[in-house]
Amino acid sequence: MAQPPAPRREAPLVPCPICRKPAAEAFAPFCSQRCADVDLGRWLGERYVLPGQDADGDEERDEDGSH
Ligand SMILES: [Zn+2]
């Protein structure tokens, strides 16, 4: 049976979600430690943003009409 050439064991071809550069094996799925930190910051940042957005949406919902 003929076998196809085995794929190389490298990081998956997924672009860095932060800057869209090819991800580095050491920092997968990111391209660098910096982008990994940025992603972590986004997660932490969203937690802070959520309460503010919630209050804003609540105001709109009130106007929309549970009147
Ligand atoms: Zn990146």
Image: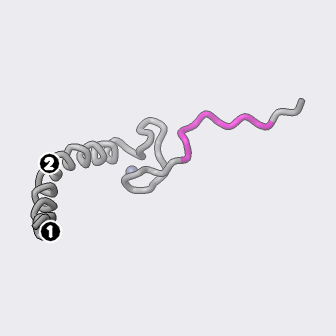
Q: Secondary structure at mark 1?
A: helix
Residue drawn at x 16%, y 69% is: 64
Label 2 vs label 1, nearer the camera: 1
Q: Report the residue at 33% width, 43% height from top.
A: 36
Of mark 2 and mark 1, the one earlier in the sequence is 2
Task: Count the marks.
Answer: 2
Which residue has dot 1 on it? 65
Q: Residue at x 11, y 70 (%)?
A: 63
Query: Chief secondary structure of the magenta span?
Result: loop
The residue lying toward the viewer, choosing from 54 and 30, is: 54
Q: How is the image coloured?
A: one colour
What is the span of residues highlighted in magenta in the rendered image? Answer: 4-13
Quadrant in which residue 47 is drawn = top left
**Rendered location of residue 35, percent (x, y):** 33, 47
Instruction: Name the quarter where the C terminus is drawn.
Output: bottom left
Residue corresponding to mark 2: 48
Q: Amino acid at mark 1?
A: Gly
Query: Is 7 located above or below residue 38 in the figure?
Result: above
Q: Is residue 17 left or right of residue 44?
A: right
